[in-house]
Each structure stands twice: as C-alpha cells, then as structure tokens.
Amino acid sequence: MRSILLFVDDIYEDLELWYPKLRLEEAGFKTIVAGHEAGKVHNGKHGYPCKADISYDNAHANAFDGLVIPGGYAPDKIRRYPKALEIVRQMNEAKKMIAFICHAGWVPISAKILKGKNVTGFSAIKDDLENAGAHFSDKPVVVDGHLITSRNPGDLPVFCKAILHFLS
C-alpha cells in the first residue's frame, strides 16, 4: 500500500489536514501523521484534535510516496524541527510529491527548496515565498513538477484533485 506522510503541530488549520487525509484514505493510500512527539495530540485552530502517529525522528522520507503540509500556524512551529526540514529536503531530492497549502509554505521556505519554483500560498506569506526565490501566482492551485501548492481551505477541492492526479 502506498503511504503519504502528513505533518502536524498545534494550531494547524483543521480542514487543511483532515480533508486531504480523508481523500487520500478514500483513494486507497495509507496516511501517517508525524509531529515532534509520537502520540501527542495537537489541536487545530478550530479545536479539532489530531494525534501524531510517529515523530519526525522516526519518519523516513524513503518510506513515503509524498508529503502533505497543512497551514494554520503549525508551519511556524514545524519549521523549527531540523528533522522535519530534512524530510522535506530528502523528498524534494527524490522528486516525491510535496503538497502544501496556506501558511505551510513556511516549511519548504525553511528547507530552502523553493528557489526558482512556481508556487501559491496564503496572501500573507507572498513576500516570504518570493524572498525565498519562488515565483508567486494568486491561483487556487499551482503545480510545479512534484510541488503542489494552494492558498486556503476554499482551494481544497482543486488541491486534493491535483494531489490525487499526481499520485495516480
């Protein structure tokens, strides 16, 4: 069974984690949620809990077919963990799918993988994405090779379609 890794931390955007997770599971993928501590329950911006199945330290990029990073304020926490950034860099080097939405662009920015890439994200981080060397477009979804990006929860239908299309 093909597996997809999702990152989580406190104050994640509830829909941006759960919508892709459930769509991937419906499509037959195994989903594993990684956080800084296995078993820790994180609360979303709107109070929905999500338990980390494994820690970043026990997540290995080669064990997964792709990565989904939800937005909210969690990405500002996630990017502080060197192992999370290492996973992003390894998946990027292997050209595995890296899908991120809203504020989640902060994680690949910190992993330094966006120079010259076409992306979108929440308007508030447009400058951050451009300062990292990315080319920003205000579109519901932007696909650049193995990178899939979207702006906000309203873009989740096209974001998930792009994810499933890439993985098919």
Image (tube, rainbow, N blue to C red):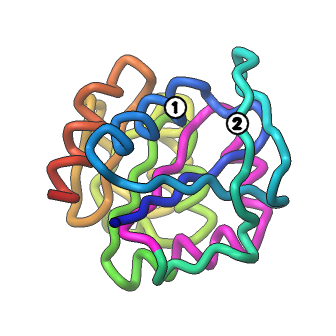
**In the image, residue 101 above or below residue 55:** above
Mark 1 and mark 2 in contact? Answer it, CB < 8 Å. yes
- Region rendered in magenta: 64-89
Q: Is residue 106 left or right of residue 79?
A: left
Tell me, for residue 149, which label it has, or none. none
Q: Which residue is located at x 48 percent, y 53 percent?
A: 31
Image quarter of the C terminus? bottom left
Residue type of the residue flagged with mark 2: Cys
Name the spot of residue 161 as percent of width and height, x first.
20, 37
**In the image, residue 38 above or below residue 148:** below
Secondary element type, mark 2: strand
Q: Which residue is located at x 42 percent, y 65 percent?
A: 114
Name the spot of residue 83 as percent of width and height, x first.
71, 75
Tell me, for residue 18, which label it has, or none. 1
Name the spot of residue 7 as percent of width and height, x first.
61, 52
**In the image, residue 107 above or below residue 84:** above
* Tally of marks: 2
Q: Is residue 77 left or right of residue 117?
A: right
Q: Residues within 10 Å of mark 2 (few under 14, many from 20)?
A: many
**Magenta highlight on residue 73:** yes
Residue type of the residue flagged with mark 1: Trp
Q: Earlier in the sequence, mark 1 or mark 2?
A: 1
In space, the residues marked 1 and 2 are separated at their CA atoms by 9 Å
Q: Which residue is mark 2?
A: 50
